[in-house]
Structures are given as structure tokens and as C-alpha cells.
Image (cartoon, rainbow, N blue to C red):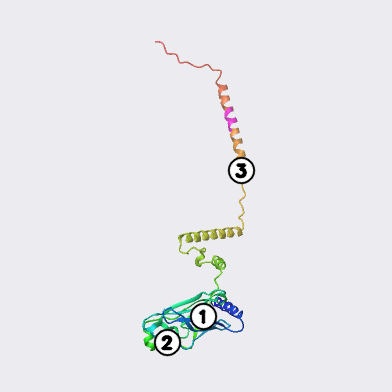
């Protein structure tokens, strides 16, 4: 914010320097009859650095003093106006506030002059709180011949793209993603998944670093059991078939014996 304010002041100073070596002067008018007419109220001088502004007032004549006193007594509105500064334009910037607030407004920095880029006038306004007791407490309204004004210059707008880029790159507390609160269940689930993946990667890394255990050497039968099993079935079939043929050949010549019942 300080850098932006300095940039605004520098821009105002460059604009004012284009006007010449003399400081910029802005004439100001005020109305003492409720806005029916305006008369000169002084000249605002802004120095070439754009850091200070001063209002120089001419003295009021007797009629103007009576008008101002009547305006305060009736709790009327005190009006100010000054040119905007646009080339070829007759438009003016105006403001108004209760006349009872004048004791506050005429104090140093009691009014603020707002400027745009290039030294153009944006407005002028009272810069202090006001209450109904101000006039009575001060014993009347006295317009000083010289008064310091507060200057308000525009500030440089932030770079939106740069802010977005920095917000996306900056990690949030707890490792949460940008735009997700750490207490969000979705964020907690994402954190748990990330921790599981990290643990699994560490485990694989540890296993890769360990030497492989030497495998036990297998026996000949353990290596060739798939070949031996069908050979065993073939041998068993051959042996079983030969025994059956021998049994059939040994009992083939004998006639069957039939039982004959005994005669009585």
C-alpha cells in the first residue's frame, strides 16, 4: 500500500510538472445564501511534489459575514465548488455540508482534496466528524486566511493475475490444496491417500534395496514330477492288463460243474 501511494504521488507530481515550474492553482468558490449565488472563496495551491495543498482565503466583507452568520443560525448548508480541470469543460466539482460543521472543516486537514490521474480534481469533502455543539463551543465561525488541506491521490490497482498465481503456488497449512480448507473431509481424504502412496513408495524402495534370498535347490523328482506322473500311469495300466489276461487263460479249459440233486 505504501508503494502504491508513492506511485500515485509520483504520477501526480509528473502531471503537475507538465504545467511548468510554478505550483498548480485551483480557484474555489462558496455559497453563503443556500446555493443561490457563488462568490470566490480562495485559491488552492498544490506544490510541485504533489504532497501538500494549501487553501488561501480572502477576507470576508461585512455582508458576507452577516450571510455566513445567518446560514449558521438557520442550520443551512454551506456549499463549495471548484473546476474539475478537464480541458475544454466547464463542469465543476461541488460539495456541501451543514454550516455548523465549519469550525471543524476550516481546521488544518479538516477538508480533503481528492485528485485523479493527471492532477484532475475528483472532489473535496469535510474530513472530520461534526456535531451540533461545534459552533457554540467555538464562539462563532471564523474562516482562516490559510488552511492546509489533505491530499488524496489514486492508488495503483493490484495485479490480479500475479495475485492469482501467488495464491495457487503458495501451499496451505497441512498440505491442503489451494481453495480447500484443511478441515474439509475431501481434503482429509486426499491427505490420507497421499500418505498411503508415500508409505507404499517407501516400502517398495526398501524392498528394492534388500538383497534377494538364495532360492533352495529342488530335487530331480520335484523338477520332473509332471513327466513322471503320466509314465507311472502307463506302467500301472500295462501291469494290471497282463495279470487279468493270465487269469482268464488259466480257467478257460475246465467245464463248469453243475450240482445234481440226489435221488431217493
Can the viewer see residue 52?
A: no
Q: CA distance from mark 1 to mark 2?
A: 32 Å
- How many C-alpha atoms fall within 10 Å of the one at disc 1: few (<14), some, or many (≥20)? some
Q: Which residues are magenta?
A: 236-241
Counting residues from the start of the chain, the first of labels 3 and 1 encountered is 1
Residue occupying image coordinates x 50% and y 59%: 190
Q: For the view shown, which residue lies furthest in the top direction?
A: 264
Indicate the position of residue 83 as horizontal and vertical percent values.
52, 77
Q: Secondary structure at mark 2?
A: helix
- How many C-alpha atoms fall within 10 Å of the one at disc 2: few (<14), some, or many (≥20)? few
> From what the image shows, is residue 223 above or below residue 127?
above
Q: Which mark is residue 63?
A: 2
Q: Which mark is residue 95?
A: none
Horizontal side of residue 161 vs 78, given as left or right: right
Q: Secondary structure at mark 3?
A: helix
> From what the image shows, is residue 120 above or below residue 181?
below
Residue occupying image coordinates x 40% and y 87%: 66
Q: Which mark is residue 221?
A: 3
Can the viewer see residue 25?
A: yes
Q: CA distance from mark 3 to mark 1?
A: 103 Å
Dots 3, 1 in contact, CB < 8 A: no
Q: Secondary structure at mark 1?
A: strand
Q: Is residue 240 magenta?
A: yes
> From what the image shows, is residue 144 above or below residue 154?
below
Indicate the position of residue 146 as horizontal and vertical percent values.
49, 88
Indicate the position of residue 36 as horizontal and vertical percent values.
43, 78
Indicate the position of residue 13 as horizontal and vertical percent values.
58, 80
- How many C-alpha atoms fall within 10 Å of the one at disc 3: few (<14), some, or many (≥20)? few
Q: Which mark is residue 151?
A: 1
* Closest to the observer, 200 or 9: 9
Amino acid at each position: 500500500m505504501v508503494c502504491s501511494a508513492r506511485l500515485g504521488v509520483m504520477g501526480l507530481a509528473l502531471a503537475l510538472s507538465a504545467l511548468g515550474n510554478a505550483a498548480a492553482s485551483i480557484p474555489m468558490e462558496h455559497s453563503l445564501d443556500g446555493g443561490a449565488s457563488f462568490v470566490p472563496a480562495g485559491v488552492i495551491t498544490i506544490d510541485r511534489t504533489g504532497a501538500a495543498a494549501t487553501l488561501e482565503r480572502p477576507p470576508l466583507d461585512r455582508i458576507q459575514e452577516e450571510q455566513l452568520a445567518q446560514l449558521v443560525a438557520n442550520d443551512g448548508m454551506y456549499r463549495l465548488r471548484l473546476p474539475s480541470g478537464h480541458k475544454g469543460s466547464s463542469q465543476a466539482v461541488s460539495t456541501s455540508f451543514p454550516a455548523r460543521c465549519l469550525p471543524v472543516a476550516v481546521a488544518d486537514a479538516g477538508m480533503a482534496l481528492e485528485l485523479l490521474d493527471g492532477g484532475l480534481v475528483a472532489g473535496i469533502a469535510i474530513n472530520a466528524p461534526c456535531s451540533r455543539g461545534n459552533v457554540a463551543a467555538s464562539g462563532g465561525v471564523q474562516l482562516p486566511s490559510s488552511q492546509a488541506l489533505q491530499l488524496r491521490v489514486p492508488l495503483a490497482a493490484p495485479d490480479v493475475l500475479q495475485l492469482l498465481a501467488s495464491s495457487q503456488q503458495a501451499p496451505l497449512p497441512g498440505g491442503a490444496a489451494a481453495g480447500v480448507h484443511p478441515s474439509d473431509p475431501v481434503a482429509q481424504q486426499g491427505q490420507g491417500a497421499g500418505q498411503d502412496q508415500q508409505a507404499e513408495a517407501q516400502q517398495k524402495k526398501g524392498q528394492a534395496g534388500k538383497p534377494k534370498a538364495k532360492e533352495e535347490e529342488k530335487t530331480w523328482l520335484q523338477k520332473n514330477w509332471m513327466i513322471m506322473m503320466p509314465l507311472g500311469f502307463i506302467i500301472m495300466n500295462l501291469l494290471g492288463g497282463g495279470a487279468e489276461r493270465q487269469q482268464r487263460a488259466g480257467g478257460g479249459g475246465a467245464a463248469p460243474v453243475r450240482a445234481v440233486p440226489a435221488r431217493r
